Amino acid sequence: MLEDREMTVVEHLTELRTRIIWVLAVFFVALIAGFFCAGPLIEYLKEKPITEGVPLISLHPSDTLRVYMQFAFLVGAVVTLPVALFHIWRFVSPGLQVNERRVTLYFIPAAFFLFIIGVLFGYYVVFPMIMLFVTGMSLGMDVKPSYGIAEYFGFLFNLVIPFGILFQLPIIVIFLTRLRLLNPMRLAKMRRFAYFGLAVVGITLTPPEIVSDILVTVPLLLLYEVSIWLSKIVYRKQLAEEEKWNNEYNMEADEAVR
């Protein structure tokens, strides 16, 4: 029995190693592809109206290489994300029931889709507001702005990537509800604290201007409400499954007594 358990552990570790190798291989291929995509992506983002009239300059000999590396890594990470999530699901799926496997499989495209939506929201909504605000402040002080290309894109990534993570909130809530660590009643009780925290995030990430604060905070609050609604659906299904199981158990117990 001990040898069987040790062999089972070894098999699991071997499977984990194999899946990690697959994910790293996909990332490596996507990273190479990212180098070829970096140039067109940089040119596209440079031509957006956000930087119109504001030159992007190189402040260091390695700035362009650094930007290319950042874009290549980002492309590789985005392409690898669904693959990594799929291999995580395949690794843990043997310990799940059939219905749980089907439900958790849907998390992969949903998580990827929400990440992309969050990044697009950060880029097309939040980033322009901040850049126009800081550029306007520079012009108001009679200072001609010009941005280092590495600092500009580094600031862009540091701003939009967190929004991709923030938009994972519904997936996280559904997962924690499935684990019975959260439920819609608890989320409803936490609403005031959650609203306050999300409002702080929205106000912190935007310029000190009421319209910008509202444009960012309201979608975050709606995201929380959607999370509560999805938690209710999962919670009701759990209650229905428990009721069905209890009914079957009571019927079997009655038959055993007879």
Image (cartoon, grey):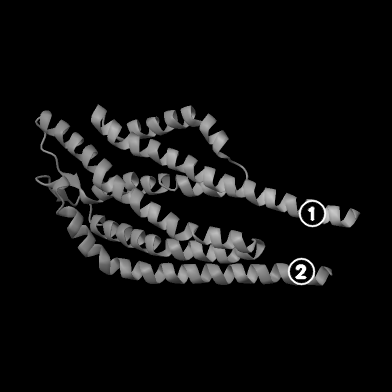
N-term-proximal mark, 2 vs 1: 2
**Residue 209 in view, yes or no:** no
Q: Position of residue 221 (x, y in %)?
A: 39, 36
- State the residue at coordinates (49%, 61%): 85
Figure check: 228 above or below 120: above
Towards the viewer: 216 or 156: 216
Q: Position of residue 25 (x, y in %)?
A: 45, 72
Figure check: 225 above or below 11: above
- State the residue at coordinates (46%, 45%): 169
Would you call the spot at circle 2 few (<14 residues within 10 Å), some (14-19), or many (20 or more)?
Answer: few
Q: Position of residue 89 (x, y in %)?
A: 55, 63
Towards the viewer: 23 or 122: 122
| Left or right: 116 as drawn, with respect to 145 | right
Q: Amino acid at mark 1?
A: Met
Would you call the spot at circle 1 few (<14 residues within 10 Å), some (14-19), or many (20 or more)?
Answer: few
User: Mark 2–mark 1 contact, CB under 8 Å?
Assistant: no
Q: Which residue is mark 2?
A: 6
Q: Which mark is residue 160?
A: none
Q: Amino acid at mark 2?
A: Glu
- State the residue at coordinates (59%, 49%): 237
Q: Which residue is mark 1?
A: 251
- State the residue at coordinates (28%, 36%): 215
| Left or right: 251 as drawn, with respect to 65 | right
